[in-house]
Amino acid sequence: MTKICQDPPAIASHFAHVEDPRIERSKRHLLIDVMTITILAVICGADSWVAVVQFGKAKETWLKTFLKLPNGIPSHDTIGRVFSLLDPEQFAKGFIDWIATLRTFLPFEVIAVDGKTVRGSYDKAMGINAIHMVSAWACRNGLLLGQRKIDEKSNEITAIPKLLALLDLYGTTVTIDAMGCQRDIAEQIVTQGGGYALALKGNQPSINDEVRMLFDNTTIEVLEAKSASSAETVDGDHGRVETRKYLVIDNLSDLPSTMTWPGIHAIGIADRTRESNGKIENERAFYLLSEAMPADRFGWTVRSHWGVENNLHWSLDVSFSEDKSRVRKDNAAENFATLRRLALTLLKEAPSKVGIATRRLRAGWDNDFLLQVVAGQPHKPPAVKGD
């Protein structure tokens, strides 16, 4: 039997700091047992408290090889109550600490910060709004580094700094859409040792107006002549051809508003042309860059940001049915969101070539594979020019 069976260190050590919210006389089950059963169950396909209990009962003999279970498997009411009371920040810290042990320092790592609404957490009758989670995805490592719930009557601008404060940004480039294009956020990223590529839109009117007045109606040929670096990619399928040209301009003398922007060294331009059925569409996007990076790396950086939709959000909806989840009570929705993201991150690292949904099934069938998932595996990153 593997070592993790006698002493599951990843779960026991990383969540040992979580305080038990129950009163003493109601503690028939150990908190670490409840958390361990639930984490393993969600990895194996459980999407509700009832399913967690069914997993526990089916695996009870095996679970007793490393859990105490003084009163057997807890009921679904007990598990649901525990997770509705658990401090979400304490529980999320356990997730962050665990994933940090799987992360490898990689040059040119991109941390994509993006938000997602957990639609099933909405309950009109009870007056409960859907929770919105902001996540930080390490694109090259293929790991979710952390998440933060957006507080009621707030937005991503207040949640992003709190999330970034939990992360090691040294040597990384943080990408955020236009909502997070804020001076304070840029300054925080630079102070924490990171760089940034921030999408520029109308919420920063001074610098946005200057950039667009200077570059919006300029031909790509003229922009290439002005740029310090340029690169091009062409993709095509099913009669559609998309040409992307990436430019990095490091001469900011004609953009006085950049003088007040923390750490800025260049403007990135992504010029996209789509041809389909004789129709041509053009789109030009601008980014504030803390580094005058080569244009091919700039292109890879901004494309990596939108990869979070497939690597994280799509998987949560398709493989974990997140938008259909009816877990809502108190802190339960936020804590279950953390459980899904922990399970997804571990499953993505698992030594398997099948999809996430099938990996969940296999983990439920095969205890040895489940232990491999929990133990974590090194990730082979995508290549980036300059490695």
Image (cartoon, rainbow, N blue to C red):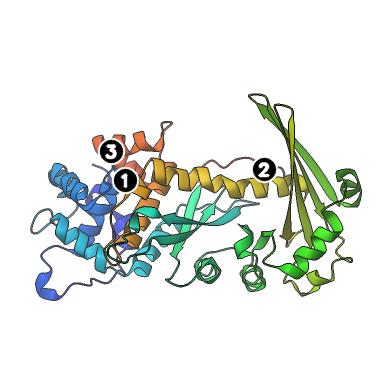
Residue 376 visible in rendering? no
Q: Which mark is residue 43?
A: 1
Q: Nearer the viewer, residue 167 or 136?
A: 136
Which residue sits at x=30%, y=41%? 370
Kind of residue at badge 3: Asp
Q: Nearer the viewer, residue 214 or 140?
A: 214
What secondary structure is found at the residue carrying circle 2? Answer: loop
The tag on residue 268 is: none
Residue at image x 73%, y 61%?
288
Alpha-carbon distance for marks 1 and 2? 31 Å
Give me the disc on residue 384: 2
Q: Earlier in the sequence, mark 1 or mark 3?
A: 1
Give above or below for 155 relative to 350: below
Q: Secondary structure at mark 1?
A: helix
Residue 58 seen in the figure = yes
The residue at which mark 3 appears reads as 368
Left-right relation of 50 to 277 = left
Q: Position of residue 26 (x, y in %)?
A: 11, 70
The 10 Å Cα crowd at callout 1, few under 14, some 14 to 19, many 20 or more, is many
Q: Quadrant of residue 357?
A: top left
Where is residue 4 drawn, in percent x and y? 28, 49
